[in-house]
Structures are given as structure tokens and as C-alpha cells.
Image: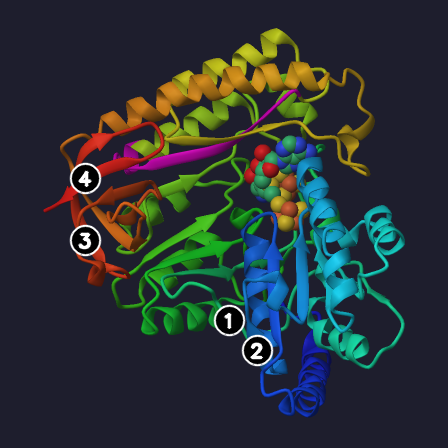
Amino acid sequence: MSDPIGASALSAARRDMLAVRSLLDSDYTSAGRRPAAMIETYGCQQNEADSDRMRGMLREMGFVPTDRREEADLILFNTCAVREHAELRLFGNVGALKHLKAKKPHLIVGVVGCMMQQKHRADEILMKYPHVSFILGTGALTRLPEAVLAALSGGERAAFVEEGTTAIPEGLPVRRESGIRAWVTAMYGCNNFCSYCVVPYTRGREVSRDPAPIVEEVRQLVAEGYRDITLLGQNVNSYGRGLSEECDFADLLARLDEIEGEYWLRFMTSHPKDATPKLFETMARSRHIAHHLHLPVQSGSDRVLSEMNRRYTAEHYKGLVSLARSLMPDLTLTSDMIVGFPGETEEEFSETLALVREVQFDSLFTFAFSRRRGTRAWDMPGQLSQAEKKERLARLMEAQQDCSLARNQALLGSTLKVLVDGVGRDGLLSARTEGGKPIYFPGDAALVGSFADVRVTEPKTFVLYGEPV
Ligand code: SAM
Ligand code: SF4
Ligand code: F3S
């Protein structure tokens, strides 16, 4: 059973959406305009997908979208708690709304998402910012209409936070910002408890969606013209546990690959401890699954990996990469790396540098360890200073830039299938390769939203330039 929230939450949400709509209709009809709403999204693709659901609910409630704070009657901040930096940015932006609220007293401000699942942050927001109308945690997303209704009715400021799972009932409306790329949730939550990571606390336990509604959602997206569809989960390789039918992630991919049409399917994130040869074989055999693997490694040191509770070694990781590359020679490999984990010695950091030089990632998301309250690493001994972390981060980024450039230079002269997503300021078309690399080339704006073949003429560290074939 993958719908623990159930039908009652869905019908309550529908009832409250209608109630908001009729309130807004009576308030705004005389004003001759529709109320406008905007969402500012921080953090990962899971949050992007949640914002799509909230946009869907806001539309049903009668709001029109805006991307200008001054025009908005309702502003939501969808927050991220993964690193301190994201949290500080959020505080700054919520604080900045104080003046707007003073000018526009009817403005509704909601702070939602991962930060609100942490009691100390939820309390801080309510205490410091009286202009915030409500807070809503990831586990209470379906209660957004209830929260908006309460705010419109002039009730007390309210907190909607639930513990446990963050799974969402099937059938909630969704409104995506792009007509080309789409996020599709495969599973909610995380059970891994990596010792540095707050996500298992902000997203609750793992729950997989049933395969049938996922297949139906992807089929629908392909029919609507979406060309690049990303399946989401914190560890998609544990997909299927707890489902009534037997279906692991590779099985799910194989079923999705049967959908006819011209599209790419990709997924994130894949945890190395659970990645299987079957997964890579399925990718290699498929018609639509992009040869792109985001396989976060986090460190090149076995001692640090063990302290991080990652449950694999650097050797195991390298073995997975060799296998994947032997099955898919054109594979684009990306990863995440953390520097300055508590107790990380200079020698252990140099093992990370050595792994980066050996594996040759196409690109790497690099992070300085950030202490997260409630996680095991919060009070581990041997915390490094900000200056030490910054210095290691700079050295890691420098090493990676050499690898990114070398990987991109190897593409010089080759012809790649790319998905055109827009026109840049310089008049060149902007597109992404199958591996997700940005590429720019001259061409007709009518190509936006379709695939094209492009020869790489000028590879740079972070982008490629090319010409149409
Ligand atoms: N579920 C994914 C996985 O296991 O690979 C990761 C999701 S997390 C949102 C994205 C990345 O943030 C992680 O891979 C990790 O590199 C980084 N991250 C998580 N917690 C962090 C922390 N406390 N400090 C620095 N980086 C962190
Ligand atoms: Fe965080 Fe680890 Fe879960 Fe990824 S697998 S979300 S890093 S706890
Ligand atoms: Fe941040 Fe929550 Fe994603 S903590 S990284 S938005 S799951």
C-alpha cells in the first residue's frame, strides 16, 4: 500500500479548494482582477515537484501565477534545510517581506517545506516574523487549501506540521512551469540516515508509489509533449520495498521505457550501496533512458564513508562506475562530494582528490560539510573550521574543473542529440545533451521544445558550443 495519507485527505483538500475559490470569487470579482500567487522554491528537485503540486492547488483555488512579489496576494516560500546557507537565505528573504506586508495588509505569507519539519526552525519563523500567516511542513502539503482558507478567514496564525511520512495521495492537481521538462515522484522519504543529512528527518520514511499511476503519469506527460522526464526519489534504488506487487526500480524503468514517443527518461538520486548491475543493464538496453547517472559518492576515504554511514567503500564505488561505463561507453557521470566532514584529515581529503582524478566525473556538486542539528554528525569530534573547509572546497573544485574540461574536450567534433529548451540572450539556442550538459548553437527559435543534432565545435569547462548538423 503506497497511499497512507488516503482518500480523506484528498477529499478534504478538494472541499477546502472550493471554499477558497468561492471566497476569492466574492472578494475579487468587484476588484476586476484575479488574486495572484507566487512560490519561491529552495532546495532539491523534490521541492520543485512539491511546488508543482502547490501551484496546481493554487490554480484550483482561483489564483493566477505571478513571479513579482509586488503583484502577489499570496507568497509561499518552499524551504530547504540541507545546509545552513539555504536556511540563512530563507530568513533574509522572509524578513524582507515585512515592508510589503505593511503596505498590503491582506498579503498572505506562508513558509512551507523541509525547514518547517524542524521544530526549532518552525518556532523561529513564527516568533521572528509576525507577518507570516502560516507554516506548513512537508508532511502536510495536502493541507495547503485549509491553511489558505484559515488565513483568508482572518483566523489565528497557524502551524500545519505532521510527522511520519510525506507521501501524497494520488490525484492531487499539478501545475508544471515548463512544458518540456517534468519531475515525477517515484518515492517519498529516505531511510538511510547518512550521519550528516537532515533529509530523513524532514521527509520521513520511504514510501514507493505504485507503478501503475507512475506509468500513467509518464504516459500522459509524453502525450502532452514533455520531452525530458526525471523520476525522483532520495534513493530510487530502494524503490519497490513495501509494494504489494514485485517491482524494483529497474523493473519500473523497463515498464516506462515501453511507452511510445520521443522523450528522455532519467532519474535521481541513485545510492551506490543499492545500485545493481540489473539497473545498468536496463539503462543500456532501453530506448528512452538517458545514459546519465548521478551517483553521489560523498568522499574518497573509506573511514570517512563509514563515519558518514554510506555503507560502501571507494573500491565498490569505482567498480560500479567501471561496470556502468563498460555497458554504456557514452555515459555521463555526475556526483556529489562533501569536504570537511568532522575528523577528515588532510590525507583523507587527498583520497577524495585522488578518486576525483581517477574516476573523471563529467561534473561534480561540491559541498562544504554543514552541521545539521539532530543528525549524528552534529556533535562528532574534530569539526573543521570554516576556513579549512573553504580551502579544501577550492582545491576540490579546481581538480574537478580539469576533469570537466577534459571530458568535454573529448566530445569535440562529435554529433550529439540535444533537447532545445530556449533562446539565450546572445541569440543562440540553448539546449541540453542527453547527459544534461548545457550546449549552445545557432538555429531557429521554432526548434524550442524539440530534439536536434548538433556537432560540438567548442567545448568549455561548464558548457559546450556547437553547430547544427
Ligand atoms: N539522496 C541523495 C543521496 O544520497 O545521494 C542526496 C540528497 S541531498 C538533498 C543532496 C546532497 O547534499 C548530498 O548528496 C550531499 O552531498 C549534500 N549534503 C547533504 N547533507 C549535507 C550537509 N550536512 N553538509 C553538506 N552537504 C550535504
Ligand atoms: Fe540524505 Fe543519505 Fe538519504 Fe541521501 S540517502 S537523502 S544523503 S540520508
Ligand atoms: Fe532540501 Fe528538503 Fe530537498 S532539505 S535538499 S529540499 S529534501
Tell me which label, 1 or 4, sits earlier in the chain: 1
Q: Report the mark closest to the observer, 2 or 3.
A: 2
Are dots 4 and 2 in contact, CB under 8 Å? no
Are dots 2 and 1 in contact, CB under 8 Å? yes
Tell me which label, 3 or 1, sits earlier in the chain: 1
Task: Name the colouring of the figure.
Answer: rainbow
Left or right, 292 with reference to 103: left
Residue drawn 38% across the image and 63% down it: 255
Tell me which label, 3 or 4, sits earlier in the chain: 3
Residue picked out by circle 2: 59
Residue positioned most to the top? 347
Neighbours of disc 2 within 10 Å: few (<14), some (14-19), many (20+): some
Q: Please, is residue 469 above or below residue 147 in the view?
A: above
Figure quadrant of residue 465: top left
**Stretch of the chain drawn in magenta:** 326-340
Label 4 CB sits under 8 Å from any ligand 1 atom: no
Measured Cα–Cα span from mark 1 to mark 4 = 33 Å
Measured Cα–Cα span from mark 2 to mark 3 = 34 Å
Q: x, y (%) of residue 190?
A: 65, 49
Q: x, y (%) of residue 270?
A: 50, 43
Q: Please, is residue 335 above or below residue 315 in the view?
A: below
Task: Kindly identify the amino acid type of the residue bearing the numbered disc 3.
Answer: Ala
Residue drawn 86% across the image and 68% down it: 157
